[in-house]
Image (cartoon, rainbow, N blue to C red):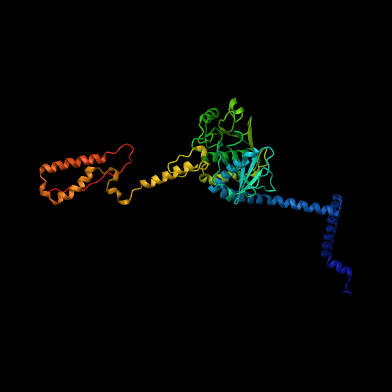
Amino acid sequence: MRNTDPFEFISQHRDTIFRVAGVLAALLIVFLIIRWLAMRQGGWAAATRRVKREFAVTGAAFAAPFRAWSRHRKALTLLVRGLRTPATWRDAERAVAAARHAAASVGATPYAVLVDDETATVLLAGRDVPEPADGPWWHDPDDGPDHWTIARQDLPPVVPVPDLPYPVLVAVGESGGCCAFLDVATGPALLTVEGERRAAAALHQAVAAQLDARLPDGQVVVAENVHRAYAGTPIRTAYRTARDLPHVLGIAPVLVTTELPDPLPPELAESPDVSPGPRILLRGTGRGHRRSLLTDRHGTITLLGTPLVLGGNALARAIARVLPDLPPVLPPAPPTGGVTVRPERAFAELDEDEEAVALAGEDAEETWAAPAGAGTRPPAAERDDAYEEEREEAPAREAAPEEYGEEAREEERKAGSAARRRRTRKPAGTPAAPSPRTSPTPRP
């Protein structure tokens, strides 16, 4: 290398030298530009924080669709699993009924309930709602004082709720792994669904579908323009129809509509206590005393005036899957042994007298059950003297058939016919019994 001419070396490696020099010059220019930008941001430390923040925002923007899809799938799975189980609905109704009884002394009214696998949290409306006293109810420090929580296994099996309407619950979303239910039977008669057009339409139809599936037949009247696949009736006709419907076991009829009648009927402007008309589910802005559900394009649902904020982007699809499995508001009445339970006592315990009557009815049903071989002989109460005489004379006739002539046989036939007529004649109020069948009399 010592004997190498430098000019000759440069001449032989000219392309490589110029390429390396160009790269170094470009790197120097880039460094100077970055340094100039960093100085404009306040130094190298500030510029580094800015770059990290921009990378984090960019990564979150790319991951947002995947995170939204994952949240949607989790919410859909939670709602489908919870709403498909009848025990979830029954425990929610029992929790609302129990909270009514427990909070009656403080003047609070339950309006919503959150149910998970182990607990039920009831939300109460009222002024200065205190924390629950010692008992099955407790207060979670992370929630407000109007949240009363109870274990599902501690819910009373029978809750007395005299003179109060039945809880009519509808699912409105999920929150923190809980299914959220709203009681539409209490509070203002007008429930409005407002917000982003597509999200509000989906929420309105989901609530209407639940009411139609859970309430008794004919208690839900759907007006026009509610669903594109259902024509409906004009709003004034639908309102008159809902207004004239009677209450079924304390449950008011429901009118589902997208607008109020114009002009507004005077009963809609009055207090629900003064004019107990139908409940109205309205999509859009209402007038008068109302309760509003507000939703946005992300599916977040808020009950205005309350701390209830829910996720409802998967509610419509979950309701479509579990709609055939939704339990009715009124469960089938258990057999009561002939005792008719009054509608207002559906959640009340039986008195001692009613329980004794029910047990007596069960005993009476057991006495009506006839043994297997009882169908071939008449009951003891229907056996008359002629029947007994006929049974006593039959062996004698068999022993001496020659003593009976034509006249004896004629008298025998007449006596047998009379005995059969007396046996088949039943007094008023006597239950049906199998007709007696006697053995034919042997003839000589």
Left or right? Give the position of 418 relative to 210.
left
| 353 vs 64, nearest the viewer | 353
| Residue 355 pos. (x, y %) | 47, 43
| 94 vs 103, nearest the viewer | 103
| 57 vs 132, nearest the viewer | 132
Left or right? Give the position of 52 relative to 63.
right
Could you say which quadrant of the image residue 268 lies in? top right
Q: Residue 2, relative to residue 184: is it above or below?
A: below
> For the point 32% across and 39% down, which residue is it?
430
| Residue 415 pos. (x, y %) | 18, 41
Could you say which quadrant of the image residue 13 lies in? bottom right
| Residue 301 pos. (x, y %) | 64, 42
> For the point 33% across and 50% down, which residue is it?
371
Q: Quadrant of the N terminus?
A: bottom right
| 148 vs 161, nearest the viewer | 161
Residue 50 seen from this side: yes
Residue 440 seen from this side: no
Could you say which quadrant of the image residue 256 lies in? top right
| Residue 178 pos. (x, y %) | 62, 48
> For the point 83% across and 58% down, which residue is it?
27
Question: How many numbered markers are drawn?
Answer: 0
Left or right? Give the position of 338 relative to 299.
left
> For the point 20% across and 39% down, which residue is it?
418
